[in-house]
Amino acid sequence: MRKYVIAGNWKMNNTPAQTRALIEEMKPLVADAKCDVVICAPYVDLAAAVEAAEGSNIAIGAENLHWAEKGAFTGEISAEMLKAVGVKYVIIGHSERRQYFGETDLTVNARLKAALAAGLIPIVCVGETLEERELGITVETVARQTKIALKDIDAAAAKGVIIAYEPVWAIGTGKVATDDQANEVNGAIRGVLADIYDKATADEMVIQYGGSMNAGNAAGLLAKEHIDGGLIGGASLKAQDFAVIVKAASK
Ligand code: PGA
């Protein structure tokens, strides 16, 4: 049985003070969760988030990392720096990074290797644009992204990787994939993982859905066979909404 993972992705929201307040508000609401609960926050909020979440069941994640250990990469943050502030998870290859900041499948692979080497739990995002869906190449797109992301990563390490299927057209748009649409693509991704590794490995790996998941639609999505959790943007900025999603994953 795969354990569900519900991860908030705050994106570019909240100051350290707001971070502390929101985590404090969330803590009692998610305390009896039967799934893993993660909040991914901006770099400057991470120390405050780790401190506020201490002793609770909320783990903290970053929204990106650089692949190099250290060096002349102005403005970048390494895996070791994240570990040093108590971060456990890291989002890699979010579509906003692919779209606005030149992220490619190969840089996703490089970041993933750095995260795994440091013992961070990576959440690797894949997903098609509206154009790709309309062209009928959704599965090809996520298969390519998944295969390249996992290049040179063996089955033992891959078991610790979380994949988040996030159709780009559903992110921040209020347009959620239907339960069946999402399950179909998540199932296809699991098929790709079985091809790369083997069925047992694929069956163990957590595949989330993300894209306008909210308090109203989470239960339906999470009831589907291949949806093992969610990567939640907008709804993770409201403690009550986030808690409802965590509860839906706690069955
Ligand atoms: P959203 O974002 O829930 O606001 O659509 C999801 C994400 O980008 O991870």
Image: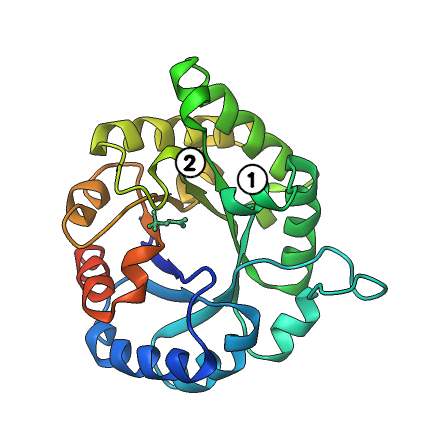
Disc 1 C-beta below 8 A from ligand 1:
no
- Mark carried by residue 175: none
Q: CA distance from mark 1 to mark 2?
A: 10 Å
Disc 2 C-beta below 8 A from ligand 1:
no
In the rendered view, would you say 119 is above or below 93?
A: below
Q: Residue at x 32, y 46 (%)?
A: 228
In the displayed structure, does residue 21 sit left or right of residue 153?
left
- Mark carried by residue 168: 2
Q: How is the image coloured?
A: rainbow
Q: Position of residue 102 (x, y in %)?
A: 66, 41
In the rendered view, would you say 95 is above or below 26?
A: above
Element assignment for label 2 = helix
In the displayed structure, does residue 101 sit left or right of residue 17?
right
Q: Amino acid at mark 1?
A: Gln
Q: Residue at x 50, y 76 (%)?
A: 45
Label 2 crowd (10 A; few <14 / some 14-19 / many >=20): many
Residue toward you, 81 or 4:
81
Element assignment for label 1 = helix
Instruction: Locate the C terminus by quadrant.
Output: bottom left
Q: Position of residue 179 (x, y in %)?
A: 21, 34
Q: Are marks 1 and 2 in contact (CB under 8 Å)?
A: yes
Residue carrying label 1: 99
